[in-house]
Amino acid sequence: MSHAKNKINWCLKKAEKELREKGKHRGLIRAEPSTTTAKEHIKKAEHYLEATLLLKAEFSDIGASTSFYSIYHSFLAILAKFGYYSRNQECTFAVIYSLIEDKKINIEKQDVDKISLLSNEKDRETVTDIKEKYQYGTELSMKKQLYADILTLAKKMLGKTKEIVEQ
């Protein structure tokens, strides 16, 4: 079993246990596939992307977060289409990797690797790392090329998500 599938199993068990013990979860549950919910997540992803564009490079530290959340809501849209509800970023990424492995979605694994590596390679900075650096750190701006690259990736993931949800 792949690392992504092992992670999904862990996430499902985590959510099940938390729901039983606390009535809410921070994992992954199976749900009815819903294109309606998927489209709502797409709207949220578009909203974050629009905010990123309004912030421009002058507020790129904040743009790191809005770009990340545009991508994240794109992925939540895909999960909704395939019958998952996630309240955990690692669980969300694991499902995306699994759907890629199973050839159920047409997203390149290397693009997801740019966002979040399940293997946690220490020499690669992901969009998740960059978001955390600028959200919790004190730097006020990032290099223009890095900002442009993250924005381009957010646009690409949103476009791919729209194609997947419409299939």
Image: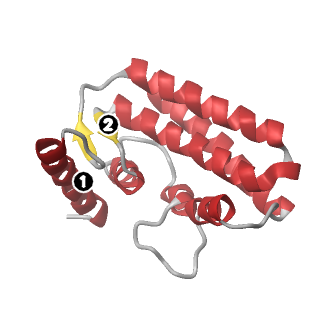
Picture coordinates of residue 165 (x, y %)? 46, 27
Colour scheme of the rendered structure: secondary structure
Image side of residue 53 versus residue 114, left or right: right
Residue 160: quadrant of the picture = top right
Picture coordinates of residue 140 (x, y %)? 81, 61
Q: Secondary structure at mark 2?
A: strand
Picture coordinates of residue 61 (x, y %)? 75, 56
Q: Residue at x 57, y 29 (%)?
A: 44
The quadrant of the rendering that contains the C terminus is: top left
Task: Pick whichever, 103 or 162, lies toward us.
Answer: 162
Sequence-earlier tag: 2 or 1: 1
Q: Is residue 108 above or below residue 52?
A: below
Task: Pick whichever, 7 or 27, lies toward us.
Answer: 27
The quadrant of the rendering that contains the N terminus is: bottom left
Image side of residue 78 versus residue 29, left or right: right
Which residue carries the number 1 mark?
Answer: 11
Between the residue at mark 2 and the residue at mark 1, the CA separation in whole angstroms equals 11 Å
Q: Which mark is residue 81?
A: none
Q: Residue at x 52, y 81 (%)?
A: 122
Total marks shown come to: 2
Image side of residue 97 versus residue 64, left or right: left
Which residue carries the number 2 mark?
Answer: 85
Point out the residue furthest to the right here.
Answer: 58
Residue type at mark 2 is Tyr
Q: Secondary structure at mark 1?
A: helix
Picture coordinates of residue 24 (x, y %)? 24, 40
